[in-house]
């Protein structure tokens, strides 16, 4: 295989017509240049120079090889620059996945920060619930996934993944504005035993958490509508068609009343999952911005004491 260092030296020898001049241009001694050309001649199997005591005249083979190697060495230089850029995160790709409410409230700031810092990097975002995105993290198709876990429906994450908690979302009541308890700062769930309920699909953590919350208050909720789209759930509540329990990121007070649950506050935990061996230089940037964005959301909740209270230490 041809050595690119030898090819660069050959180009200077052909250009200058002298081993000594080529050495001065490249920072080698004339002897070192001569040795490199001997090795290159062995590689190509032919003479590259007609040597005399005072000169080294390039052969037709040397001139042809020097000419043809320009494009190859140029491509190698370009590859080296790309690799260096990828190592420091200026280029390369970052693949993230997250669930819908985090995509709406948290990920825009994260994606914007990564793109601003690394404008030449390729940044991708996919959406899915935890079970839909974990596989991509495990097999390397996704660098990090933002997932959730309910206190009332705990789960185990794969041991080969790091799981960093980013945010504790309080579970809050969403009531129609005309509801008899709409003005209350907090409501005991048992006082809503006779209400009709709206929640996510029956096979979701949110639905299981509602059933377990209700069981702790000695009733079985009458669930009349189901949707995995929290905007739909809020609209149904706003129309007076039922009551819902929403995680903090899904809360919007437009046309609904939001209040705290009385008693011990349940949470949905937002976490970042990523492989321990992932060396993508863009990943720490994304994780740092995820932490900052979630901290900003939590700070906003602490300032809204009418509906939120911080998690007990």
Image (cartoon, rainbow, N blue to C red):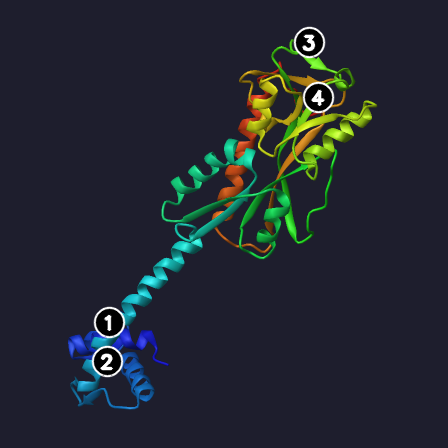
Q: What distance separates the C-alpha of mark 1 from that of mark 4?
A: 76 Å
Mark 4 / mark 3, whichever is N-terminal: 3
Instruction: Name the mark nearer the viewer: 4 or 3.
Output: 4
The x, y position of residue 49, in whole percent, is 21, 87
Q: What distance separates the C-alpha of mark 2 from that of mark 3?
A: 88 Å
The x, y position of residue 138, in whole percent, is 61, 54
Q: What distance separates the C-alpha of mark 3 from that of mark 1?
A: 81 Å
- Secondary structure under tag 4 reads strand
**Direction from residue 259 to residue 94 in the image, left or right:** left
Provide the residue designation for mark 3.
180
- Secondary structure under tag 3 reads loop
User: Does 189 sit above or below residue 159?
Assistant: above
Provide the residue designation for mark 4.
196
The x, y position of residue 232, in whole percent, is 57, 28
Instruction: Name the mark nearer the viewer: 1 or 4.
Output: 4
Provide the residue designation for mark 2.
65
- Secondary structure under tag 1 reads helix
Q: What distance separates the C-alpha of mark 4 from that of mark 3?
A: 14 Å
The x, y position of residue 47, in whole percent, is 24, 90
């Amino acid at each position: 295989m041809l050595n690119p260092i030898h090819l660069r030296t050959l180009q200077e020898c052909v250009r200058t017509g002298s081993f000594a001049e080529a050495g001065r241009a490249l920072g080698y001694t004339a002897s070192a240049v001569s040795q490199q050309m001997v090795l290159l001649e062995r590689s190509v199997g032919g003479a590259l120079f007609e040597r005399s005591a005072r000169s080294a005249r390039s052969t037709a083979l040397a001139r042809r090889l020097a000419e043809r190697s320009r494009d190859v060495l140029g491509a190698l230089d370009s590859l080296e620059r790309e690799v260096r850029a990828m190592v420091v995160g200026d280029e390369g790709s970052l693949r993230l996945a997250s669930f819908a409410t985090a995509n709406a409230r948290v990920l825009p700031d994260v994606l914007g920060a990564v793109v601003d810092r690394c404008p030449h990097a390729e940044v991708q975002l996919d959406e899915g619930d935890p079970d839909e995105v974990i596989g991509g993290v495990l097999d390397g198709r996704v660098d990090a996934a933002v997932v959730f876990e309910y206190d009332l429906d705990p789960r185990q994450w794969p041991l080969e993944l790091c799981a960093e908690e980013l945010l504790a979302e309080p579970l809050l009541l969403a009531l129609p504005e005309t509801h008899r308890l709409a003005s209350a700062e907090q409501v005991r769930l048992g006082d809503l035993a006779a209400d009709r309920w709206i929640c996510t699909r029956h096979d979701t953590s949110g639905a299981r958490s509602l059933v377990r919350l209700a069981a702790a208050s000695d009733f079985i909720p009458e669930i009349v509508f189901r949707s995995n789209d929290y905007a739909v759930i809020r609209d149904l509540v706003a129309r007076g068609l039922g009551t819902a329990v929403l995680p903090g990121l899904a809360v919007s007070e437009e046309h609904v009343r939001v209040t705290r649950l009385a008693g011990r506050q349940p949470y949905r935990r937002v976490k970042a999952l990523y492989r321990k061996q992932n060396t993508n230089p863009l990943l720490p940037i994304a994780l740092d911005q995820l932490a900052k964005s979630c901290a900003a959301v939590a700070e906003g909740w602490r300032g809204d004491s009418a509906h939120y209270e911080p998690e007990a230490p």
